[in-house]
Image (cartoon, coloured by chain):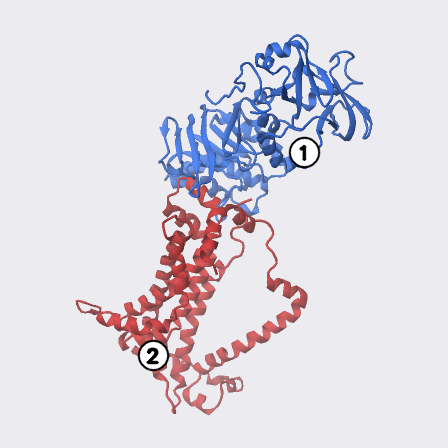
Amino acid sequence: MSTAGTQAGTAADAPRPGAGSAAGAPRRSVVARVVGRVGGGAVQAVLAVIALFWLVPTFGLLIASLRSNEDNNGGGWWQVFSKPSQLTFQSYSALLDKSDFVDSFWNTVLITVPATTLVVVIASLAAYAFAWLEFPGRDWLFLLVVALLVVPVQLGLIPVAKLYGQIDFGGFKMAGSITGVVLFHVAFGLPFAIFLLRNFFAAIPRDLLEAARMDGGSEWTIFRRVVFPLGGPAIASLGIFQFLWVWNDLLVALVFADPSSQPMTQWLQSQMRQFTGNIDVLAPGAFLSLIIPLVVFFAFQRYFVQGVLAGSVK
Amino acid sequence: MAEVALTGVGKVYPDGTRAVTDLNLTIADGEFLVLVGPSGCGKTTALRMVAGLEDISEGTVTIADREVNRVPARDRDVAMVFQSYALYPHLSVRDNIGFGLSLRRIPKAEIREKVDKAAQTLGLTEHLSRKPRNLSGGQRQRVAMGRAIVREPQAFLMDEPLSNLDAKLRVQMRAEIARIQRDLGVTTVYVTHDQTEAMTLGDRVAVMKKGHLQQVAAPQELYDRPANLFVAGFIGSPAMNLLQGRLTGDAEDPRIEVGGQTLAVPGRVLRERPALAAYLGRDLVVGIRPEDMEDSELAAAGAGGGASLTSTADLVEAMGSDVLVHFAVEAAQVVTEDTKELARDAGTDVLGHLEAPRTDLVARFSPRTRVKVGDPVTIQVDTGRLHFFDIETGASIWESAAGSPREDEV
């Protein structure tokens, strides 16, 4: 992929191609064409089957979390259909009474929210600069960011752990702290985030930014009032990706978080027993850790509106 | 409202491409100036330099006596209408129009009032709460205009604002732009490649070619007294016919020889153009406007004397109000840098028939003509209205030897 070339191209003649792609009837997507050929009914049937495959274990988890440990040990969750009286919130109330679980839940929140917010804020500012500001070395710097995409998290674990070990600001130790986990997530989330947003921002017609400039907008105003709102769909999807990735992370937490800052995933993992069943702890814990991202997804889902640029140019 | 002045303005891109060279233009307060020229002539670049969207490489731009070379676009207090309209898709029509005002921290009530007034001027009142994507092309164009007028700027800059509209709407919006500009009296610089727009809208029209200003004049003067071959060929539709000829005879009884045919020219033509005497016995370029030719059967007998051409009608286009007759004479084509540029703009290739001394002409006949394709035709030429150009320089031949009365300095 020649990023430098793409870059030069979009910078030089952004208005015309931008205008072309943003206006007119959108080309039918691959999915739309496939659906058209196969027939809506068949596709929906396949989708329903796939959805069922994904939903059944989740549903099983939900039921298991609503049964007592003895019932779960006595038979599978589907027995609930014959004995609905088994259902109880007992596991949940027991779990929520465990202070270390509640702490780990809040730790997850304290790690995920800043790690997501920081990535979105920093990446959108950087992406705006990469897409629309002229500064020396811009294309090379962007190339570097893209190159960082291929650096796996595992490669950073040991060096960063060593680095954290040396950071100690008057009693605040980076190693083991929530801050350390957040910073690691931000650092490894940024390359993809910048890449995604920069390409989205670069597709905004140049005329729009120039119009805002003529209307009296400074770079900051243009970013805040034109580019950021127009980037809504990309920013929303980035936010969800980042949120899910951090929320579900176990590896980074295992390396960098000490017991006082461990997130839910780590806590759940520590509850795993090899021989004795403690599904009354695992099932509600897992379900709670699953339901929050779902809520976030549906909250942001309305921003995935297609064709936000329609009508702006031409 | 203010005077906009460009002094020796040039634009060189970092890669060395030169887009504009030594552009001198003064747009008076309240004047409507149209910059016209073929694509790539630097007109849009010039406009963008006034807007502040493009750095000024050479010279100075002043708006209301303030040099703005280093002033960012947002502080120049000029408004621009883009070819693509560039409406903010996430904002309603009301917010689109009021965007510039809201950035200037003007109280909400005042913005509301001004937007309402602008919307009323443009007939957008019932669309104020809609999003741009729900508007028709003409309505979007109006919103773009509204965004400019609501700010009451020092000047309007318009970059081909009508080129995305269909022909009918374009005529309608053209009239509307003229009306709005006259009502508001705001200095306006309007860029277009459409010479009809240029002629109908401009108080003055500036013709550009390859980054150089060719002529600035009122539309009719541009049409009647083009400074050079390029302006002559660019302004007017169908274009002026240009062909090589030779000026013979003497000062009292001059004649033009084109393709073996002779046209008698009234003696006053030479008296009006003292410089022309120097061309007696020499080759020059003769320009004939299509409307200065008429079917000799219809022309009043004896009006043009012996000034007629004979040929065969190659193509007859009935336009209703008149008939365009295409024919050829065996005169050499005019091949200069100007005509090449014109041909490039028109998408034709002059070099194709360079070998044969044959030039295609178009005449605008009265609809009463009975000429059909293939008919022999005698064309009466109003030789009193011929245009003459130097064959080397392409400059129009008028009073002095220097020829071209360039109107760069006002």
Where B42 sits versus B304, above or below?
A: below
| Count of numbered badges drawn on the protein | 2
Question: Any mark on residue B30, and which?
Answer: none
Residue A259 located left or right of residue B166: left
Residue A199 located left or right of residue B399: left
Using a 10 Å C-alpha cutoff, classify the residue at mark 1 as few (fewer than 14 neighbours), some (14 to 19) or many (20 or more): some
Mark 2 and mark 1, same subunit? no
Residue B231 located left or right of residue B114: right
Residues at marks 2 and 1 touching, judged by CB atoms closer than 8 Å: no
Please name the color used to draw chain A: red
In the image, residue B233 lies at what x, y percent? 61, 28
Where A267 sits versus B343, above or below?
A: below
Q: Residue at x 50, y 80 (%)?
A: A57
Disc 1 secondary structure class? loop
Badge nearest the viewer, 2 or 1: 1
Q: Which residue is the site of mark 2? A: A267
Amino acid type at circle 1 is Leu
Question: Any mark on residue B354, and which?
Answer: 1
The alpha-carbon separation of the residues under discs 2 and 1 comes to: 87 Å
Amino acid type at circle 2 is Trp
Q: Residue at x 67, y 21 (%)?
A: B245
- Residue A99, image quadrant: bottom left
Disc 2 secondary structure class? helix
Residue B357 located left or right of residue B150: right
**Chain of the residue displaying label 1:** B
Please name the color used to draw chain B: blue
Query: In this rendering, does residue A72 appear at all?
Result: yes
Residue found at the far top of this picture: B252
Task: Please state which of residues B207 and B52 is positioned toward the viewer in this rendering.
Answer: B207
In the image, residue B336 lies at what x, y percent? 59, 30
